[in-house]
Image (cartoon, rainbow, N blue to C red):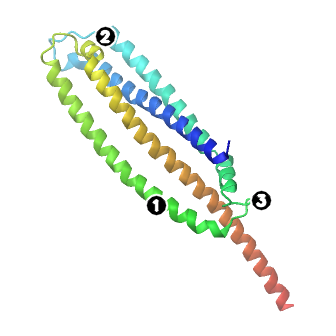
Amino acid sequence: MKPEKKDKIFFIIALSLGSIILAGVILAVDFLYSGIQEKYIANVITTYTPNLELAQKVILSSSLTICLGLIAYGLIIWYLTRTEKIRLQLEEEQILDQDSSLNFRTFQTEISSSMKVLRDLFVYLIVVVLISGLFSFLRFVWILSKYRSSSDLFIEYYLTNIPSMVISITLYLALGYMISYIVFTSLQKYMRLRVISISYERAMEKVLDNFDRLMKEDQK
């Protein structure tokens, strides 16, 4: 299997896992919010009797899920953006030589393409933030309107509302995919530019050293 194809397969797998993990983290944050709200809602509505035991379980399990999910997500990012891995990719693309010397013929092309990708990802990020904000607002309004017609405890209604859960999980997966794509691609581009920048500085140091050496020889 060619290295480029292998890297694409690994990226797709990492993107899929990252999307699922991030969707789980966002959903856990949702549950954490509902648990906190259930725990302290009696301070606002004195006639409401909260299920404190269930609220405490939801808060603890959600907090643990968020921590483990973020750790797993961080490991995926670390795997995709390892310096040695990026360096090998650049060598395979003949941007760097085996001795990490910079190939100036492909240097300008890489810089231009990376800048275009980062610009597009910035616009993509704005769209994702707007969509996620709109979804959160509409979901809150929908849950609030449905809950008024229910006699269940808020947290029990929140956790057992199947239509709401299906819609939330579906949209959180889509949101997790979009965010993961932006994060993974941006960090990979950043690491590529960082490795290239270091190689460029080293190459320029060699050029200046050779120039100084030639100038000294001419003066002699």
- Specify the quadrant that holds the N terminus: top right
Viewer-side residue, 153 vs 180: 180
Marks 3 and 1, Cα distance to the nearest angstrom? 28 Å
| Residue 16 badge | none
- The image quadrant of residue 214 is bottom right
Q: Residue 44: percent from the left, percent from the top?
A: 18, 20
Of the image marks 3 and 1, the number of the one nearer the N terminus = 3
Q: Which residue is under mark 2?
A: 52
| In-image side of 4 versus 52 (left or right) | right
| In-image side of 23 versus 164 (left or right) | right
- Residue at 66% across, 55% down: 90
Residue 98 to residue 107: above or below = above
Marks 1 and 2, Cα distance to the nearest angstrom? 52 Å
Q: Residue 119: percent from the left, percent from the top?
A: 42, 58
| Residue 99 badge | 3
As drawn, the residue found furthest toward the front would be 1
Q: Residue 141: percent from the left, percent from the top?
A: 18, 30
